[in-house]
Image: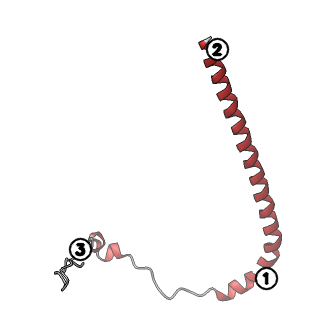
């Protein structure tokens, strides 16, 4: 009798997990379909606008006036230092301030 209860409990738990997995899979499929639909709609709207914007972007591209600086090559030890906090003396009220 006890084995039958354990077996029924195990089967019930298995089917509960199976149904939960099916529900989650159904929700995931609906979300993926919705995202695909939104992506298609967005592409239908934005692709015609992209051809109008490309010539504007071509005019706005300018060479960069600033150059990238590699601070590790400049001073590698400076990048490894951790800033220190110095403790100030007590103020007039007797509280320690940083």
- Which residue corresponds to the image point at 65% horizontal and 88% vertical from the top-left? 60
In the rendered structure, are the residues bearing label 3 and label 2 in contact, judged by CB atoms less than 8 Å apart?
no
Residue 69 found in image quarter: bottom left
- Which residue corresponds to the image point at 83% horizontal and 69% vertical from the top-left? 44
Q: Earlier in the sequence, mark 1 or mark 2?
A: 2
Residue 45 in picture, x, y percent from top left: 82, 73
User: Which residue carries the number 2 mark?
Assistant: 4
Q: Compared with residue 22, is residue 45 higher up or lower down, i.e. above or below?
A: below
Between the C-alphas of marks 1 and 2, the distance is 72 Å
User: Which residue carries the number 3 mark?
Assistant: 84
Q: Compared with residue 66, is residue 37 higher up or lower down, i.e. above or below?
A: above
Nearest the eye: 84 or 39: 84
Which of pointers 1 and 3 indicates the residue nearer the eye?
A: 3
Nearest the eye: 83 or 9: 9
Q: Is residue 40 left or right of residue 13?
A: right
Quadrant location, the C terminus? bottom left
């Amino acid at each position: 009798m006890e084995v039958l209860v354990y077996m029924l409990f195990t089967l019930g738990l298995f089917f509960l997990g199976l149904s939960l997995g099916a529900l989650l899979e159904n929700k995931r499929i609906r979300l993926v379909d919705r995202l695909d639909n939104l992506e298609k709609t967005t592409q239908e709207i934005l692709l015609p606008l992209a051809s109008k914007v490309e010539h504007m972007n071509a005019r706005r591209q300018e060479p960069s006036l600033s150059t990238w600086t590699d601070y590790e090559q400049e001073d590698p030890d400076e990048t490894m230092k951790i800033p220190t906090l110095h403790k100030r003396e007590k103020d007039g009220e007797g509280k320690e301030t940083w």
